[in-house]
Image: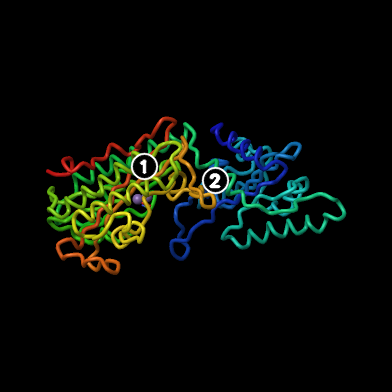
Amino acid sequence: MHPEYRHRREQLMQKIGSGTAIIRSAPMAVMHNDVEYNYRQDSDFFYLTGFNEPEAVAVLAPHHDEHRFVLFVQPRDPRQEVWTGYRAGVEGAKERYGADEAYSIEELDAKLPEYLRGADRIFYHLGRDRAFNDTVLRHWQRCIAQYPRTGTGPVALEDPGPILHAMRQIKSDAEMEQMRRAAAIAAEAHIHAQQFAAPGQHEYQVQAEIERIFRMHGAMGPAYPSIVASGPNACILHYVENTRQMQDNELLLIDAGCAVDYYNSDITRTFPISGRFTAEQRSLYAIVLEAQEKAIAQVQPGNPYNQFHDTAVRILVEGLVDLGLLCGDVDGLIEQEAYKPFYMHRTGHWLGLDVHDVGVYKHGDTWQSLQAGHVVTVEPGLYLGPDIQPVEGQPEVPEQWRGIGIRIEDDVLVTATGHEVLTAAVPKAIADLER
Ligand code: GLY
Ligand code: MN
Ligand code: MN
């Protein structure tokens, strides 16, 4: 067992003081009828345990004399395991995952009260599993009913998210290594896709090449449904059908990343399928690239989270004004959000065990400051869809600009002195994308 899981549990237990934390595993997800997707553990559960089986509950009870970390798991059952794979079982939970005590999940109702007895609060995330929410509430209710007699017991239910997610936001050295690996595999896939893509091929063929490389290197698979969007499809932010035949003189937008031992990468590149940008494509691409590079330069410890977004927006707006696609003064256009028909999403998000990772962006009105160990994506774009509707008072978009969508996305680790672009290996300079 990686000692880091133990360290994370100790950190969390320090912060919950005399509380008891109850963390639930992810459910199995149905693909269709009785066929299920590959199991993917809940990120909080995985972060604290490294345990990747369903039907499990982790309990952290820092106030308990002997059992501070307890796992409830599916018991060994050779007749079931022959269908669904080996289970760690109760013994494995202790030996391999470091639980001080472990029980069959069937014993949860009988054993949980022992771990709630000395607690002043219950830390539990009210999730989508209503039946399990009910289980936790029922146990809490029983504690409350006993309170007048015992004078002790949990008096509040608290979401562990703020504590746990602040921890997850700062990547350890080991996590940084995992993220570098996820970035490197996805980078290789993008580099290959840039060489492989050609007019006449279908988008799914490029997708297949990318995902082949993910698996060839042992990644779990795509971090999210791969987007391979040619021509006007690039203007659909979450285009995942990937069915179109690519044409000469079009751009191809690829947004694809992989998961390596649960850690994700998230890369977007846009390039000319036939090796040359048209004049319009080149002008817009140059703007997005400048916005992205200047935004990345703002990813520095101490800078407020929104600074790189604001930088990107300003450069995109200046560029659109230079091209005559927006008219007016740059500050005013930003203020009235006249760029939104061209750029409707934000410039990034936290990245980690979840692709849109946990952690707050704002405390009230104050943006969180970037700190060493944070990982963000930086992903400005411009989307001039066939039906783009400028805001009132702005010119119509001339025909030759329509149907062009561009996004450039890198994964950036904040370091003590600046940043490290984890996905820098994938070409994005105009000269490197033309043949
Ligand atoms: N691929 C999802 C995103 O870029 O946020
Ligand atoms: Mn992203
Ligand atoms: Mn992406």
Q: Are marks 2 and 1 in contact (CB under 8 Å)?
A: no
Q: Which residue is mark 1?
A: 411
Q: Is residue 37 above or below residue 292?
A: below
The amino acid beneath tag 1 is Asp
Residue for badge 2: 165
Disc number for residue 278: none
Q: Could you give the CA–CA distance between mark 2 and mark 1, rounded to whole angstroms?
A: 19 Å
Q: Quadrant of residue 417?
A: top left
Q: Residue 199: name its quadrant.
A: bottom left
> Is 152 on the left or on the right of 78, as rendered?
right
Q: Is residue 329 left or right of residue 116?
A: left
Q: Residue 217 placed where, x, y %? A: 34, 39
Q: Locate residue 97, reporting x and y percent.
A: 59, 38
Identity of the residue drawn at 41% across and 38% down: 179
Q: Is residue 68 visible?
A: yes
The amino acid sitting under disc 2 is His
Residue at x-position 58% and y-position 58%: 127
User: Dot 2: within a 10 Å radius of its alpha carbon, few (fewer than 14), some, or many (20 or more) residues?
Assistant: some
Q: Assign a secondary structure to mark 2.
A: helix
Please state if 387 lies on the left or on the right of 144 as rendered.
Answer: left
Left or right of 414, for residue 119: right
| Element assignment for label 1 | strand
